[in-house]
Amino acid sequence: MIRVTVPASSANLGAGFDALGLALTLYNTVWMEEAQGCHIESADDSQIPTDESNMIYQAAKLLYRRCGHPFRGLHIRQENNIPMTRGLGSSSACLVAGLLGANTLLGSPLSRADLLDLAAELEGHPDNVAPAMCGGLVTSVMEGGKVHSVSVPVAQNIRFAVFIPAFELSTAKARAALPETVSREDAVYNLSRAALMTASLFSGSLQNLRFGVQDRLHQPYRFPMIEGAEQVFYLSYDLGAYAVCISGAGPSILAIVDEAQSDRFVREAHARLTQAGLGDWRLKLFSCDPHGACVAFE
Ligand code: HSE
């Protein structure tokens, strides 16, 4: 039996649409072994597909096929801590777990870089799968079916407060809301800020984050789909967040806060959510996971 642990991820970070993402200290765990047929169980009563449509199972099966190895089936047990359809990389975590787990069961014929290429191909964009696989703050480019990426740590005094609403928003729906073309002015607006965002998170130039996080490519179109988002942005900045953005395609919101202020931030933000009639939003505090997906033998 092997155990695969994969972190949640927050993609885009404002300006870096489909390019930037970071891993969070929130993990799904998957236990996997070869079996005859499909045997899937939840370790925590999460509602997961227990048939062959299960994403971990599908990814693992695909890896066996790509490696030219006969696939008989798997026994999978999964513990899901990453909320699903909330913009926190739950589907990427499943893909990475399935690919990495299956590759390990086969004796690791593929490298981590090969697995990342495959995960990005399946996901369609690399900004969640890259941090899920590698950890850290990751800048990724996909070209010719390959992911070219760099993972760097974020400054140590940064924490990530994640506001998670009770409702879901599918990535497909959130992508369908975006325009097909953008102006050169908006393209330049975003690319300059995306570059500033990564350099500032890495170097700890915290005063830049509020500017680096600004975006014109996706958030303006997604705000109307996330009831309460504007209040969460407002209260987060009011309580001293360095930067606030939609996490991935939403609906969760990511606030970047100073570690020394983070407990106060969470306490006061909880009270403000209730006052704003958003008491059903959850609020969790994380660091940036530096390791990415890990495998152990049990
Ligand atoms: N970059 C993606 C998006 C992340 O914003 O649609 C969600 O998978």
Image (cartoon, rainbow, N blue to C red):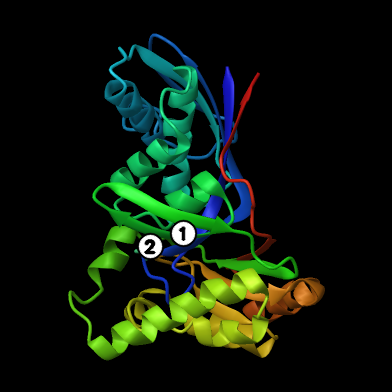
Q: Earlier in the sequence, mark 2 or mark 1?
A: 1
Q: Contact (CB < 8 A) between labels 2 and 1?
A: yes
> Which residue bears the numbered disc 1?
86
Residue at position x 73%, y 72% from top? 266
Q: Nearer the viewer, residue 134 or 84?
A: 134
3D distance between C-alphas at marks 2 and 1: 6 Å
Rendered image quadrant of residue 180: bottom left
Name the kind of residue labelled 2 in the image.
Leu
Vertical arrangement, residue 148 with respect to residue 236, above or below: above
Q: Nearer the viewer, residue 184 or 163?
A: 184
Name the kind of residue labelled 1 in the image.
Arg
Q: Position of residue 236 (x, y in %)?
A: 63, 82
Mark 1 residue CB less than 8 A from any atom of ligand 1: no
Q: Secondary structure at mark 2?
A: loop
Q: Position of residue 210 (x, y in %)?
A: 57, 86
Residue at position x 55%, y 79% from top? 244
Q: Position of residue 214 (x, y in %)?
A: 46, 84
Q: Residue furthest top?
A: 36
Q: Secondary structure at mark 1?
A: loop
Mark 1 neighbour class, 10 Å CA radius: few under 14, some 14 to 19, many 20 or more? many
Q: Nearer the viewer, residue 192 or 85?
A: 192
Decide if residue 173 is on the left or right side of residue 150: left
Tell me the tag on residue 142: none
> Which residue bears the numbered disc 2?
169
Residue at position x 49%, y 71% from top? 13
